[in-house]
Image: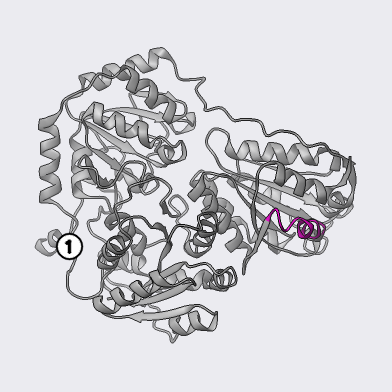
């Protein structure tokens, strides 16, 4: 049958099982929005306050479900406003399809009104992107975009469609969605056997888990692997929830703000099994001294990540769920009781600690964990509050911690929380923010109100850019350049002005009461929590130092 390009776009979305689109309309994309109106009972459209919010919402939708998030934007500034969200998704391997519309084909390249080369702009931050100048190629291009976004290591794909292509007609017939098989082509018997030998020879093995274990849904296989290897487990920010944070073998996060137990343990191990992690600089510290006494076995779907930041002894390329299955089949149960006992001593000797009096970030995270019984879907912005949320909440399941890791995008959390809440209406979604982050995209509070989403926004308000101030205190002689936010913004009034409920907490008791009320609420709630400007995230590894040189506040006071 003959359909317009706009009709083809909507039919392809339905074909792909898309139930929600986040976006913002404009002239170039009006044909698509007109068609979307006719299918509003099949595809929900969420109008955000800003296109960046739409991209973050599509990201949060995808991270919390594993499905592909979709966002729409018009040409020019509408398209460029998606860029930060696309880059965020790219750095953290999030499946997303961004559909933009541009000026007509005959106006491309002529500096037409609201024309921008969005494909050129996003080339470095997408898995692939397309400009569709022929309506006859539109359907297959959209199908290909979804396949690329999901296949192998996921990521964002952009499809840019000139407006006249959305009006032109072409033959269209629906096609079934092609199943995407897990990538196993490069998993060889030889490599598996070599890995088994390394595992059996190790006396002090350590398992290091990254976001790839979450993406591949490898939690069950990972738990079995940890039991069989009888090894301690640490993770990255993106790996949260892949391994149960309450498990006795779990020693906490690794890296700059990781636990001393994990940092010392990895520095002492003789075999490091890295599962779905890219060895980010914030994790490894000084690359020359990282796990210097260990052989390294890396399991990853992307061959580019092997030997990129850290030279490894063996890399197995493939879906980590499938690799772990094969290793579990061949690995006989090991016994490392002495090594585990040593690590448990580290856990007891170097627990995470904080000032117990007064209202602090760690206290609030622990109270949220207690009040939600560890079952909340936690979203964060970026900064000190993000690290506290990673350190003090025990993530039992994957896809329950949603945060911008690779790009570190301030202003990410509220949009992502909206996407996560819409995708998971039965879960309690909480966004942990700093005052600096909240003011970046607090306009999306209006979106949460309009959608009647019971999101709880916890603002750890220290009236400074906390993480930057922490660095200025420790490494820049307390030169607080452009990091003090002593203005007159009242976040409770902002919340109320946008139609949400607002509370302020200055004590532990006030926070407990406000959070309990928020849990009972059926509408968005903002809790403005006043904390000390000089509260810091501990422990910490100085930039360029070895992770074994992690120091706490007590260490700093002694020295």
Residue 316 horizontal side relative to residue 165, left or right: left
What residue is shown with label 1? 553
Q: Is residue 40 magenta?
A: yes
For mark 1, give the secondary structure. helix
* Quarter-of-image position of residue 510: bottom left
Q: In the picture, which quadrant includes the C terminus? A: bottom left
Viewer-nearest residue: 36 or 336: 36
Please name the predominant secondary structure of the magenta segment in the image. Answer: helix
Residue 134 shows in this picture: no
Give whichever of 451, 133 is nearer the camera: 451
Does residue 471 lie above or below 267 as drawn? below
**Going 48% across and 72% down the picture, which residue do you hit?**
524
Q: Which residue is found at the position 49% from the left and 49% from the top?
A: 63
Direction from residue 423 to residue 387 in the image, left or right: left
On the image, the x and y values in percent for residue 154 come to 54, 39
Residue at the farthest bottom position: 488
Q: Position of residue 412 (x, y in %)?
A: 50, 61
* Residue 483 at x, y percent in the picture: 39, 73
Could you say which quadrant of the image residue 111 lies in? bottom right
Residue at position x 48%, y 46% in the image? 92
As drawn, 381 above or below 236: below
Residue range (magenta)? 31-43
């Amino acid at each position: 049958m003959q359909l317009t390009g706009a009709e083809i776009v909507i039919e392809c979305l339905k074909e792909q099982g898309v139930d929600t689109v986040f976006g913002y309309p404009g002239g170039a994309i009006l044909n698509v929005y007109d068609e979307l109106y006719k299918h509003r009972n099949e595809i929900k459209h969420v109008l955000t306050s800003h296109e960046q919010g739409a991209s973050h919402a599509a990201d949060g939708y995808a991270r919390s479900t594993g499905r592909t998030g979709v966002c729409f934007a018009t040409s020019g500034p509408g398209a460029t406003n998606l860029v930060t969200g696309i880059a965020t998704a790219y750095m953290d391997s999030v499946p997303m399809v961004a559909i933009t519309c541009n000026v007509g084909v005959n106006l491309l390249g002529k500096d037409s009104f609201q024309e921008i080369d969005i494909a050129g702009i996003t080339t470095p931050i997408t898995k692939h992107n397309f400009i569709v100048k022929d309506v006859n190629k539109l359907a297959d291009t959209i199908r290909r975009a979804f396949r690329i976004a999901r296949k192998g290591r996921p990521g964002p794909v952009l499809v840019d469609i000139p407006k006249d292509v959305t009006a032109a007609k072409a033959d269209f017939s629906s096609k079934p969605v092609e199943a995407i098989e897990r990538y196993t082509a490069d998993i060889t018997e030889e490599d598996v056997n070599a890995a088994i030998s390394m595992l059996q020879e190790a006396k002090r093995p350590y398992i290091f888990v990254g976001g790839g274990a979450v993406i591949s849904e490898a939690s069950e296989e990972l738990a079995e692997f940890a039991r069989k290897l009888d090894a301690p487990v640490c993770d990255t920010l993106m790996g949260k929830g892949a391994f149960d944070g309450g498990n006795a073998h779990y020693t906490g996060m690794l890296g700059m703000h990781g636990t001393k137990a994990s940092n010392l343990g990895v520095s002492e191990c003789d075999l490091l099994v890295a599962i779905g992690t890219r060895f980010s600089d914030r994790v490894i510290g000084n690359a020359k001294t990282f796990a210097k006494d260990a052989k390294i076995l890396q399991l990853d779907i992307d061959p580019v990540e092997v030997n990129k930041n850290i030279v490894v002894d063996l890399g197995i390329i493939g879906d980590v769920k499938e690799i772990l299955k094969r290793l579990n089949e061949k690995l006989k149960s090991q016994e490392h009781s002495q090594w585990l006992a040593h690590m448990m001593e580290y856990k007891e000797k170097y627990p995470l600690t904080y000032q117990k009096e007064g209202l602090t970030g760690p206290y609030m995270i622990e109270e949220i964990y207690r009040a939600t019984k560890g079952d909340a879907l936690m979203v964060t912005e970026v900064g000190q509050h993000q690290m506290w949320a990673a350190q003090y909440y025990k993530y039992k399941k994957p896809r329950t911690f949603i945060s911008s890791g690779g790009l570190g995008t301030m202003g990410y959390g509220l949009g992502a929380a909206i996407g996560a809440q819409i995708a998971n209406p039965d879960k309690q979604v909480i966004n942990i923010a700093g005052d600096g982050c909240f003011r970046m995209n607090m306009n999306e509070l209006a979106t949460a109100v309009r959608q009647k989403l019971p999101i709880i926004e916890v603002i750890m308000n220290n009236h400074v850019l906390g993480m930057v101030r922490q660095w200025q205190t420790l490494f820049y002689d307390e030169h607080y350049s452009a990091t003090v936010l002593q203005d007159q913004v009242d976040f409770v009034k902002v919340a109320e002005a946008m139609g949400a409920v607002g509370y302020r907490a200055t004590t532990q008791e006030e926070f407990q009461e406000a959070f309990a009320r928020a849990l009972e609420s059926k509408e968005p709630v903002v809790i403005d929590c006043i904390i000390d400007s000089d509260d810091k995230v501990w422990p910490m590894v100085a930039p360029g130092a070895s992770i074994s040189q992690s120091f706490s506040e007590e260490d700093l006071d002694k020295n």
